[in-house]
Image (spheres, rainbow, N blue to C red):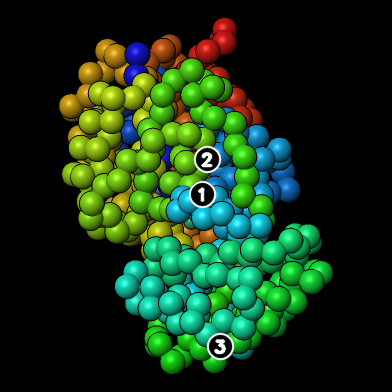
Amino acid sequence: MKFLLLVPDGMADWRIEKLGNKTPLEVAEKLNIDFIAKEGSCGSALTVPKGFEPGSDVANLTILGVDVRKYYTGRGPIEALASGIKANLVFRCNLVKVSDVMLDYAGGRISDSEARKVIEHLNANKTFDFVKFYPGKSYRNLLAINKEFENDVKTFAPHDIQGKKISDFMPKGGKIAEILCELMEWSKEVLPLVTEKANMIWLWGGGKIPNFPKFQESWRVKGAMISEVDLLKGIANGLGMEFVEVEGLTGYVDTNYKGLVKATLKSLEKFDFVALHTEGIDEVSHEGDLEGKIEAIEIYDEEIVGKILDKADLEELKILILPDHPTPIELKTHVAESVPFAIYGYERDEVKSFSEFSCAKGRYGSINGLRLMNYFIRREKF
Ligand SMILES: [Zn+2]
């Protein structure tokens, strides 16, 4: 038996007046995703525990059966796992564009090579010897702190403060907050010398590097992960899952779908469990592009789900499909609300299509997202 987890990031949404009070999922033509719902059983899962930010890190860890209340230390540390960085504390270092307000949390989607130059320049000119900047992908970089500090700082995610006054959202707390603030202020002088896309670093989401329970020990299956973002690579490394690299990924709707499908099918031959996480639908949701979101869902349905259903051995395959969290077009950001899910390969229920409201009426009902792996892999009696 093989297990395939499909996570179209940010696919769930709210009812939208312009769509006649329907959600993008209800409007999009997506026969293949609907097939999974129709031939399987559905439900609604809360993937972000109370009190947590609805980030893809928290949501995906929950889906994979990790209790974030015990293990989560921040986004930066998970991305540090992706590149094998070791440090006392690790923070996410976004390259951002600001005036007195946050103009662009994504630094004009700066290219990897330009971002690398910025990071090199920061390291060459840094004022603290115990910090080091590490390049990641595009605007998503890291700051490692190699000195014992208590992590008593409160930071703010830059994508949540678009258009807001930055002075209200600088790091707050003890000694470490002072250091972060100083670095952020200093960066305003350094960045404009090397790039026009970003004029400040934004430090947030930091903590100690976590020690996650290993996926194979928890579920007795050998797992592989395919994703376009470092965050999921970090989760894979932390859980002891194989991370499968694919060429030509953009993390956007124009990504290399063929490559992702090929890697998925190939990984299913080698591993018991394969997770495929894709980013495009979430990105258009952040842009508030309604037409784009519907189209992105349709492309995902055809290019990913359809192609996999065509080629995989469905007799031997269980499939779980769900977005990690909703990203409502209206808000252009994530919310900590339930997401629809469908599990193919066991019983069938009455649900005929995949959406926020249809799946909620399914056989599994409303569940805590931490239960998903139990229902999917069924290592215990269901
Ligand atoms: Zn997102």
Residue 81: numbered disc? 1
What's the residue at 54%, 30% (across, down)? 214
Camera-near label (3 vs 2) is: 2
Q: Amino acid at mark 3?
A: Lys
Residue 97: where, in percent of width, then height?
49, 82
Q: How many marks?
A: 3
Q: Amino acid at mark 1?
A: Leu
Point out the tag, 3 or 1, that comes first from the N-terminus.
Answer: 1
Whether pointer 1 and pointer 2 mark residues with C-beta atoms closer than 8 Å, the reply is: yes
Residue 200: where, in percent of width, then height?
54, 82
Residue 188: numbered disc? 3
Distance in Å between CA atoms under marks 1 and 2? 6 Å
Q: Quadrant of residue 364?
A: top right
Which secondary structure lies at badge 2?
Answer: helix
Distance in Å between CA atoms under marks 3 and 2? 34 Å
Please tell me which residue lies in front, 73 or 21: 73
In this rendering, the answer to whether 272 lies above or below 189 is above
Q: Which residue carries the number 2 mark? A: 238
Q: Residues within 10 Å of mark 3 (few under 14, many from 20)?
A: some
